[in-house]
Image (tube, rainbow, N blue to C red):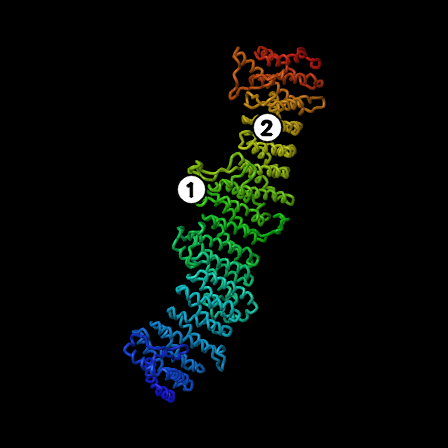
């Protein structure tokens, strides 16, 4: 062996093709001695051969190696020097040596197909030869690297391992060698070396790829700052690890990538950043390790900060397009904008990943990036971002949501849990199906797109197609708000609110804002129409014609959704108030209709107990509806101080407000036909209830207070006068006032009468000034007084007497209003109206009782003495005003008052006498629906004696006549018409007919009355 080595060493330059024979011999001798390759390609003795294929030679090998043990290091050294001395060979001789080594290696590769322990002599010496000749690497690199790549694909693991080791070692050594010309300035040579490492990416053996990544990490560590034009190849090597590889390789590659981004980002030429972005994104797509994918998204965020700082170096990006795909190049974008587009595209693709955590992280990063650094983009770049990234992203996520499974996927959850640590993850019920997980992504994308347009609106408005952007966004919001998924629907409303919620000076009303330009006006009109569409859609009966009101499976919106929807109105209307809303009554009609329909939507069964208001509190939805109506009223008043444009809205506004007032009596009904049946949930079935009633009393009462206050401020407005607003108010209040004790809540009619008084205090003054506009109101007013003062409703049996006394005081206030605000102006009021008012006073004046236990025969109501007293006093006051200075109009009211009262008294007396004759000695029957009256006070003695309602009525009439006769006799001379005296005298026979009454109380009352007639037996001197 020494001889062969000496010959080869001395005559290597002339051996030519004989190198193959010498190398074959040396390979055999090395095998016999037991040399094995070690680091760097040197051969060392490792002991007895253990290969079973070499068993026949084992004994002889052991003998030889034992005898020559002392010479083995020398032989190993001589063998290494032989190949190291190849540095002195000329290029031709070197090629012969390399060719012989390659031929020998090929032969070993063929043998290795059938043996477990192949000969690695040729590969080791190829490595040693290459390392010795790095100074002329371009002479031998291609044949050696090409052959080693073939070796790396061998099926024998040992052969493949050493082939990879040889190639990666040569690459590392070549990059570290000090050439005459700096390697990193020699682009051709640098690429030639690194490309050989890159070609290992085509080999799918795990051990090969592992060695490749180890070499890459070593290159980055040692040569990262100086790679320059070699970066694209290095980055492609890292990016060649795809989602099909195992987690070990992915972690290795991610380690390399982390090093690149954290340590060498500033050293990478900017023109290669596009490649880096795409490589980083690949690690976000891999599915082996969730943490690595999330880390990749973090690296993308780090790159955004770097790109933001690179704005001033944009001139260095001239060759960016050379490293981009054709579909990534835009003629209208600068180089740095193209990099931003790549970044946005990759994040948008990650947002459509199948893993919820990746989607959430990617979407958050994407929109944060746009918000933070979007100002770097030109209008052209923004147009591309919106139309080619954001809107397509939303459409695809929407499609994924609607096609996602609603069933829980246990296998998928187990896979996700394994990838994140090997432990099972407990999923919340709101995220335990793919559909729910995609719904979360849907919400994030919609919110992100909306926020982007809202924040960048001033800049985006410069786009020629911004109206189209606005329209598409609003369409998506509308579609999402009407989606069946409650999470998406509510999120759409929040996005809509963000879009329209542009801060304004709170001190300014909507009318104080600057006029909108036509383009902006059109945009906000579209937003208004979307609000209307959402309102109509969410308050409409479900298309399946069946109402499901379960919390987790409902086809009608929740109260929270409806509340948020109404809360959008003030923010939105600010933009179109002065320009459109106050000029178009149709807008207010649509708005108020939606308010009414929304309030009628049933409550989800499981939430009913938490949403039903108390006697004084409103639900959140009712509070929002109230604030919306209050907003309109408040701004209408402000508008009226500046212009009359808003006057047309006033009558409509009052009508709609009064509709809401009546909800205290008749709650709204959801807009569905009678054929539709609600499907009760199990809980509802157990309770025997099919829906949850909401108490509208506090809401309606609050609306009523606001309505009357509003009317007090605008009562003299021409539009309010001409459209009969006061009459509408009276007609509305007539409902609770006539129901009185039958109202669902006693506070309703009490507030109604209070508001009735307030409205009349203001309205009657206006009505007297504009009599022609109020001709039809007087009939309704009289009817309202009559229905309230003589209501057919009966007080509850358990009502305290103090409460009844307070109620009687309210009735007295009504008479005081008639006395002070109506009758003094009878000369300008319709005679028919005055007649009805006087009839009311007559009817009230003939009932007198000290307690609340008397019941009126006709109206079945409890008698009220104070009320009767004030009615009678009012009649008397306006019955004695016929002095010499009185006008003809005053004569009318005098005649009407007295004549009406006397006719009523005569009617009662005649009826009593007639009924008494018919029944003889039997007691008179009680009137229909009357109960026995117990505990009434005797008229004369104030003693407690039980007697019938008919008796009480007669006593009241007789007392009234006595008082009237006395008053007439004390009246001024000529102040009473002769007809009144005739009517009074005509009552005398009726009184005589009643003297046969068996009731001592009635007889005593008749006696007192007849005593008053003594002076009337002859006409008084003034009328003779």
> What residue lies at 56% left-to-right and 34% top-to-bottom?
732
Residue with the mark numbered 2: 803
Q: Specify the quadrant that holds the N terminus.
A: bottom left
Which is closer to the viewer, label 2 or label 1? 2
The relative height of residue 967 versus residue 219 in the rendered view (above or below) is above
From the viewer's side, name the closer residue of 69 and 392. 69
Q: Earlier in the sequence, mark 2 or mark 1?
A: 1
Residue with the mark numbered 1: 545
The relative height of residue 904 versus residue 130 in the rendered view (above or below) is above
Choose top left, top right, bottom left or bottom right for residue 678.
Answer: top left
Neighbour class for label 1 at 10 Å: few (<14), some, many (≥20)? few
Q: Position of residue 738 (x, y in %)?
A: 55, 29
> What residue lies at 65% left-to-right and 44% top-to-bottom?
641
Q: Is residue 413 visible?
A: yes
Q: Is residue 793 visible?
A: no
From the viewer's side, name the closer residue of 544 and 261. 261
Q: Position of residue 588 (x, y in %)?
A: 55, 43
Q: Specify the quadrant that holds the C terminus.
A: top right
Secondary structure state at the residue bearing disc 2: helix
Q: What's the CA distance linking mark 2 and mark 1? A: 48 Å
Secondary structure state at the residue bearing disc 1: loop
Neighbour class for label 2 at 10 Å: few (<14), some, many (≥20)? few
In the shown orientation, is residue 187 left or right of residue 842? left
């Amino acid at each position: 062996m020494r001889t062969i080595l000496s010959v080869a060493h001395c005559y290597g330059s002339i051996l030519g093709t004989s190198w193959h024979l010498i190398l074959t011999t040396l390979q055999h001798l090395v095998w016999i001695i037991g040399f094995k390759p070690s680091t760097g390609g040197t051969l060392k003795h490792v002991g007895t051969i253990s290969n079973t294929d070499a068993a026949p030679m084992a004994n002889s090998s052991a003998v030889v190696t034992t005898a020559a043990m002392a010479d083995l290091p020398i032989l190993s050294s001589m063998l290494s020097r032989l190949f190291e001395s190849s540095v002195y060979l000329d290029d031709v001789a070197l090629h012969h040596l390399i060719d012989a080594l390659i031929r020998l290696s090929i032969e070993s590769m063929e043998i290795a197909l059938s043996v477990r322990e192949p000969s690695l002599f040729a590969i080791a010496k190829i490595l040693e030869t290459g390392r010795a000749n790095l100074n002329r690497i371009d002479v031998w690199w291609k044949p050696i690297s090409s052959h080693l790549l073939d070796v790396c694909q061998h099926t024998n693991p040992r052969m493949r391992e050493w082939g990879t080791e040889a190639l990666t070692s040569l690459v590392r050594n070549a990059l570290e060698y000090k050439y005459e010309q700096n390697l990193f300035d020699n682009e051709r040579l640098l690429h030639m070396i690194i490309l050989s490492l890159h070609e290992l990416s085509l080999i799918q053996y795990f051990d090969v790829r592992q060695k490749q990544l180890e070499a890459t990490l070593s290159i980055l560590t040692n040569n990262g700052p100086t790679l320059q034009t070699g970066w694209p190849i290095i980055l492609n090597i890292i990016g060649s690890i795809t989602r099909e590889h195992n987690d070990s390789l992915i972690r290795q590659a991610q380690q390399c990538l982390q090093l690149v981004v954290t340590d060498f980002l500033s050293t990478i030429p900017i023109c290669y950043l596009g490649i880096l972005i795409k490589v980083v994104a690949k690690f976000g797509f891999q599915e082996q390790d969730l943490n690595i994918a999330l880390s990749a998204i973090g690296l993308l965020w780090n790159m955004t900060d770097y790109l933001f700082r690179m704005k001033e170096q944009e001139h260095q990006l001239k060759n960016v397009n050379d490293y981009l795909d054709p579909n990534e190049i835009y003629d209208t974008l600068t180089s740095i904008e193209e990099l931003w587009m790549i970044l946005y595209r990759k994040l948008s693709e990650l947002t459509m990943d199948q893993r919820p955590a990746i989607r959430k992280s990617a979407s958050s990063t994407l929109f944060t990036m746009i918000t933070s650094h979007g100002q770097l983009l030109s209008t052209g770049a923004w147009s591309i971002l919106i139309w080619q990234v954001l809107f397509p992203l939303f459409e695809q996520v929407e499609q994924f949501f609607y096609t996602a499974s609603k069933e829980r996927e246990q296998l998928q959850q187990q896979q996700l849990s394994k990838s994140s640590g090997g432990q099972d993850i407990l999923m919340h019920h709101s995220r335990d199906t793919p559909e729910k997980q995609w719904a979360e992504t849907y919400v994030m994308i919609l919110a992100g797109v909306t926020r982007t347009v809202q924040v960048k609106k001033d800049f985006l408005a410069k786009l020629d197609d911004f109206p189209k952007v606005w329209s598409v966004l609003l369409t998506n919001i509308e579609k999402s708000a009407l989606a069946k998924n409650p999470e998406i629907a509510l999120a759409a409303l929040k996005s809509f609110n963000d879009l329209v919620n542009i801060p304004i000076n709170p001190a300014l009303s909507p009318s104080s804002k600057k006029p909108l330009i036509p383009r902006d006006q059109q945009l906000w009109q579209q937003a208004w129409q979307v609000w209307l569409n959402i309102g109509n859609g969410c308050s409409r009966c479900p298309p399946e014609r069946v109402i499901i009101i379960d919390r987790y499976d409902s086809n009608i919106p929740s109260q929270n959704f409806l509340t948020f929807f109404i809360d959008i109105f003030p923010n939105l209307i600010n933009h179109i108030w002065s320009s459109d809303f106050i000029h178009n009554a149709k807008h207010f009609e649509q708005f108020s209709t939606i308010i009414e329909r929304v309030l009628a939507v049933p409550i989800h069964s499981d939430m009913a107990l938490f949403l039903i208001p108390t006697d004084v509190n409103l639900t959140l939805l009712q509070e929002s509806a109230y604030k919306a109506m209050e907003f309109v009223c408040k701004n209408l008043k402000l508008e009226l101080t500046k212009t009359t444009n808003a006057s047309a809205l006033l009558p409509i506004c009052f009508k709609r407000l009064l509709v809401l007032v009546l909800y205290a009596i008749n709650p709204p009904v959801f807009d569905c036909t009678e054929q539709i049946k609600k499907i009760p949930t199990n809980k509802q079935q157990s309770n025997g209830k099919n829906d949850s009633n909401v108490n509208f009393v506090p809401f309606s009462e609050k609306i009523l207070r606001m309505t009357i206050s509003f009317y007090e401020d605008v009562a003299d407005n021409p539009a309010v006068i001409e459209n009969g607003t006061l009459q509408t108010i009276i007609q509305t209040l007539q409902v609770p006032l006539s129901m009185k004790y039958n109202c669902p809540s006693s506070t309703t009619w009490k507030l109604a009468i209070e508001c009735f008084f307030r409205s009349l205090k203001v309205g009657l003054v206006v009505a007297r000034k504009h009599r022609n506009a109020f001709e039809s109101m007087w009939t309704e007013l009289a009817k309202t007084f009559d229905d309230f003062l003589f209501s057919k409703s009966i007080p509850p049996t358990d009502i305290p007497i103090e409460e009844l006394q307070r109620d009687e005081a309210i009735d007295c206030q009504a008479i005081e209003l008639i006395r002070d605000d109506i009758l003094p102006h009878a000369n300008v009021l319709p005679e028919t109206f005055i007649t009805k008012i006087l009839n009311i006073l007559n009817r009230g004046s003939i009932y007198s009782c000290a307690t609340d236990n008397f019941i009126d025969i006709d109206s079945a109501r409890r008698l009220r003495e104070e009320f009767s007293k004030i009615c009678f006093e009012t009649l008397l006051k306006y019955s004695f005003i016929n002095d010499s200075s009185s006008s003809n109009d005053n004569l009318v009211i005098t005649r009407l008052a007295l004549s009406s009262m006397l006719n009523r008294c005569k009617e009662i007396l005649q009826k009593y006498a007639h009924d008494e004759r018919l029944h003889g000695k039997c007691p008179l029957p009680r009137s229909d629906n009357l109960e026995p009256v117990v505990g009434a006070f005797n008229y004369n003695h104030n003693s407690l004696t039980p007697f019938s309602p008919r008796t009480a009525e007669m006593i009241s009439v007789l007392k009234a006549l006595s008082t009237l006769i006395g008053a007439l006799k004390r009246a001024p001379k000529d102040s009473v018409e002769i007809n009144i005296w005739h009517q009074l005298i005509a009552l005398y026979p009726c009184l005589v007919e009643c003297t046969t009454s068996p009731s001592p109380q009635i007889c005593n009352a008749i006696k007192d009355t007849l005593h008053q007639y003594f002076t009337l037996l002859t006409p008084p001197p003034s009328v003779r």
